[in-house]
Image (tube, coloured by chain):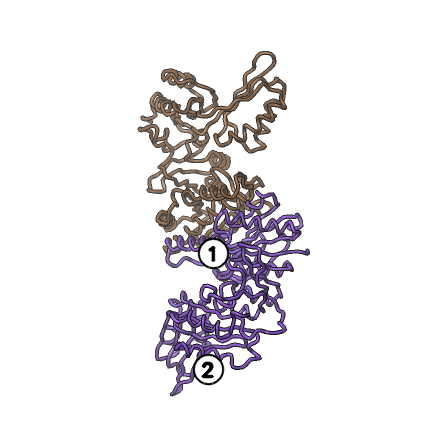
Chain colours: A purple, B brown
Amino acid sequence: MDNIIVQKYGGTSVATPERIKNVAGRIINLKRAGKNIVVVVSAMGDSTDDLIDLAHQITPDPPSRELDMLLSTGEQVSIALLAMAIESMGEDVISLTAAQVGIHTDNIHTRARIVDIDTERILAELKRGRIVIVAGFQGVNEFNDITTLGRGGSDTTAVALASVLKAEMCEILTDVEGVYTSDPRIVFNAKKLDTITYEEMLELATLGAKVLHPRSVELAWQYDVPLMVRSSFNEKEGTIVTNMKLENERVVSGVACDKNVAKASVYGIPSRPGVAYRIFSALADKGIDVDMIVQNMTREGKTDISFTIAKENLGETREVLKKVSEELGSDGVNFEDGLAKVSIVGAGMINHPGVAAKMFEALYELDINIELITTSDIKVSCLVREDRAEEAVRKLHSVFELENI
Amino acid sequence: MDNIIVQKYGGTSVATPERIKNVAGRIINLKRAGKNIVVVVSAMGDSTDDLIDLAHQITPDPPSRELDMLLSTGEQVSIALLAMAIESMGEDVISLTAAQVGIHTDNIHTRARIVDIDTERILAELKRGRIVIVAGFQGVNEFNDITTLGRGGSDTTAVALASVLKAEMCEILTDVEGVYTSDPRIVFNAKKLDTITYEEMLELATLGAKVLHPRSVELAWQYDVPLMVRSSFNEKEGTIVTNMKLENERVVSGVACDKNVAKASVYGIPSRPGVAYRIFSALADKGIDVDMIVQNMTREGKTDISFTIAKENLGETREVLKKVSEELGSDGVNFEDGLAKVSIVGAGMINHPGVAAKMFEALYELDINIELITTSDIKVSCLVREDRAEEAVRKLHSVFELENI
């Protein structure tokens, strides 16, 4: 089927009945312009948090299968309401849960991965001339149990649907107008980018730019899904994320800041093969994502390993490391939060040496201490004290002249 | 499988996290006493009404398929929370939606009827030693769309499950301690009945006693499901509803009062075959339940038909009758609300003539006008002004000496 557009509206865009009606009007305009439309929606506003609160009033540690059963109702409410709004405005529409679509996932509750998606029912409904509203963030496993996809779940649902449906565009509608050179709340003169590469977007997404979840960008890149980030409150063109290499590649496209960072260190581990494996597989077993990793050789055949994690995983990480560190016979562990990761990202960096040095110089000028450094082909990240992070971002935005991009 | 108990907890019993934990404790006690337990729960407190309000903020007339999609989330929330509570207290448990169980219904959204129920998954989970929590009020139709069962839906789910699982008892746990000779809020000295027949309960349920929905009683009667109505707040024995004929059958077992009544009349209909069929099939097509029906022959080959409906169906009934009455060439229609139906019910009535006369006499003594009368083998119902209904109930309770039952 041609002319398929997948749109994804986040929780803010459907937070109230009034906003749901606005979104409905916008979808209808697009439909009347001749498009076949599949819409993915998140739960209304803070309703997912409200459900989590409710679960925590029952037990501090709710079983993950039942948590998914509970949380998936949030999206089911918003798809029903959005379908009602569209039907009341005179367009034919149907809402579908993930189980009804056939969004099949693995069995890892609360952070399931999509395995495959049936297109039969969606295509049949589109052929009947209906707008199809799909619940984001959820799936169904081999036991017919409801799963949820975890963070960035609705973006991932949208991109996966756009891929299997061969949509001409996957639009992520959100409360910002696109991807900016930095967070406009931190950098006053941050600029909106017209285009950005998947790779840059992936680094920015990973770095906490929060516009798009890295999982969804990765998926879009892998399956070459054309992606646009745009505002749900106005009709302005947003930022297109593509594979296209630009003629004049920008050296640095953005400065990102992630404040949700804690650091964990294991000291004095007897250095032998498999040490890193032991630590990080134990963390992976608990589903804890590890970000920056630094290992140094120290004296007397002992080594230190430091890494960063999301703040909310600090408690669980502490438990895991206590056990593993004893097994490894290390000298001790240490934890720190109140940290932030400041990064510069740009696909052109690879051809321009000295970019990292320029970043370190800028931080040195501000007298900001760097706790960890990691780099890739297209980014440099520095871990700094959280209370100095915004200064650092503004300085880097200015040093790399992003206000003139 | 032996020793299966099906319990149903209504919305009041699971209205708060605290109450959910109480219910969980009670279920666990029963489990540890060696029973295999299937629990049906309704949505928490007023949450169904809240969802309906939300829908009405979108559109005054939400499409019924999407309304079912929306409303079914209420029960999904409570099954997840109850399962969390039970698991946190150390028992193995699983929650299942109607789609996961396989509660198959027809396609009439918002008032679907159960067609059949798969027992495979429930029995498999019970065999694993798990307590099974099932979402009440909902089903799934042949298109895999979610349906809801309408009023009394959760009771009906419980009885239907008890039937297919061949449960030894279906317990309806509610905010009253059983079935009373009359509404204790109206009649101060109303008594709790130890047993009642399906037939009596059916009449009482239909008459607005609100303890059990008539659909569920009908179903229990049809499939001989042993039923108990009891309190969810204490462990007292409730009222058992059975097929057993009592040695000394009570003449009158209860006095009921239904205030949710409106009356509709069609005047001067040319009297020919099929007139009643035309009127009541048109109402049935809209799913409007008609209760008391009275037809009188009048002069010149014309007839009048009056009947009662639930107040909330008055608007729709008005529309249907306007059209049908024109087609039939009748002289006009009339509507009235502010009415109540007062009834006496008793399986022994059939062998005791003069019971109806005693009722009419009691109402005459209070100078209460009777607008319509209907009778069955085991009940007599009178339609009276709503503002006189409670007086009438108290008088009848006393005249038939129900305080000494």
Residue at image position (43%, 51%) is B131
Label 1: which residue? A68
Label 2: which residue? A273
Mark in front: 1 vs 2: 1
Would residue A139 be visible to someone looking at this image?
no
**Quadrant position of the C terminus of chain A in the picture:** bottom right
Furthest residue in direction bottom, as rendered: A300
Earlier residue among tags 1 and 2? 1
Residue type, label 2: Pro
Nearest the viewer among A191 and B119 is A191
Q: Secondary structure at mark 2?
A: loop
**Quadrant position of the N terminus of chain A in the picture:** bottom right
**Residue B106: x and y, percent?**
57, 41
Nearest the viewer among A365 and B115 is A365
Q: Secondary structure at mark 1?
A: helix
**Residue A50: x and y, percent?**
42, 53
Residue at image position (55%, 52%) is A97
Label 2 marks a residue whose chain is A
